[in-house]
């Protein structure tokens, strides 16, 4: 009989939680930056948890990693140099290197233990990290963009929620540094939380990105293990528009991303439009 008693609960706010039945805890440690737990769940395969929050699972990771990567990379006509801030599991990198134009992909992850444990317990997610075009840097993403002006065509902010080391990744000053780290026609995308659970944050982030970039566009995807399942991403772009400049699909074998999903993801329900109308 299965153990009916072992459950992982993420307390997502004072009033909201998600529960997953777990078969066992595979790994647990306190790193220099956060607590790190890996569990085997019944529903979603292996689960990566940082500071009590779900980062990714084997079975739904494809939605997040395809949508954070392929939407910006099918907006830029010729992305050659790409930077991921955070994303130590390697999922965004795995998707980025599917693009034939990409010559270099840098991962700037603050916590080397996320990278090492992902290689061990999430080999399908971390698989791209061994590619010769990939440069893995264990460093604070804020410092990294400060030191690399005008270098990247596309930057992805694949960060934890705005607590602990990620607080600075949700600030206007950081978006200004991202702007400066991009080439003249560069663009960036950040994961920007749930329109149901994080309304204030979404409004603030949208206003901040608008104050730095000539174009700001929000899009949505459905991610079952993130708070409320409805997830937002925000793009800041110097030149290209994700709908007018959308490129024909360049990668095959995607499970969530398609040219139609790319278009549809920018159709926002009125209550979401309301959050970002300022
Ligand atoms: N690919 C989905 C997984 C993540 S993990 C986000 C990563 O951001 C973590 O590994 C964390 O160590 C890293 N990180 C946090 N702050 C910084 C920083 N300042 N510089 C570089 N890396 C950083 C995203 C999950 C989204 C969860 C939504 N609920």
Image: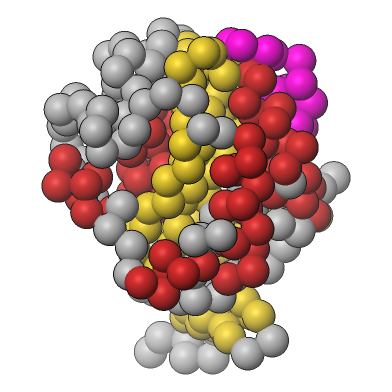
Where residue 69 sits in the image (x, y, percent)?
39, 36
* Residue 270 image position (x, y, % from top left): 36, 72
Residue 139 rendering spot, x and y as whole percentages:
75, 28
In the rendered structure, the answer to whether residue 89 lies left or right of residue 244 reads right
Q: Quadrant of residue 7?
A: bottom right
Residue 186 against residue 40 in the figure, above or below: above
Question: Where does the magenta region start and end?
Answer: 137-151
Q: How many numbered marks appear? A: 0
Quarter of the figure with the C terminus: bottom right
Which of the pair 20/190 is nearer the observer?
A: 190
Residue at the spot 47% in from the left edge and 91% down from the top edge: 4
Q: Magenta stretch containing residue 142, yes or no?
A: yes
The reply to whether the magenta stretch includes residue 102 is: no
Q: Is residue 13 left or right of residue 42?
A: right
Residue reaching furthest to the right: 32
Q: Quadrant of the N terminus?
A: bottom left
Q: Position of residue 225 (x, y in %)?
A: 44, 68
Q: Is residue 69 left or right of residue 159?
A: left
């Amino acid at each position: 009989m299965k153990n009916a008693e072992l459950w992982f609960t993420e307390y997502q706010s004072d009033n909201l939680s998600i529960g997953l039945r777990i078969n066992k805890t595979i790994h647990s440690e306190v790193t220099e930056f956060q607590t790190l737990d890996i569990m085997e769940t019944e529903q979603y395969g292996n689960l990566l948890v940082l500071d009590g929050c779900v980062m990714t699972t084997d079975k739904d990771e494809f939605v997040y990693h395809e949508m954070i990567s392929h939407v910006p990379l099918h907006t830029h006509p010729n992305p050659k140099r790409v930077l991921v801030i955070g994303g130590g599991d390697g999922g965004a990198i795995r998707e980025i290197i599917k693009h034939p134009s990409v010559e270099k992909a840098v991962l700037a992850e603050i916590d080397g233990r996320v990278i090492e444990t992902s290689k061990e317990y999430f080999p399908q997610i971390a698989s791209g990290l061994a590619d010769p075009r990939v440069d893995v840097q264990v460093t604070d993403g804020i410092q990294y963009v400060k030191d690399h002006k005008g270098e990247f065509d596309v930057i992805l902010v694949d960060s934890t929620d705005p607590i602990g080391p990620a607080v600075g990744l949700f600030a206007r000053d950081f978006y200004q540094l991202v702007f400066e780290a991009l080439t003249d026609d560069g663009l960036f995308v950040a994961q920007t939380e749930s329109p149901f659970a994080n309304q204030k944050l979404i409004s603030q982030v949208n206003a901040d990105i608008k104050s730095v970039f000539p174009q700001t566009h929000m899009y949505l995807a459905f991610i079952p293990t993130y708070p409320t399942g409805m997830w937002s991403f925000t793009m800041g772009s110097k030149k290209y528009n994700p709908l007018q400049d959308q490129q024909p699909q360049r990668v095959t074998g995607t499970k969530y991303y398609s040219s139609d999903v790319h278009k549809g993801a920018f159709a926002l329900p009125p209550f979401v439009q309301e959050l970002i109308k300022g």
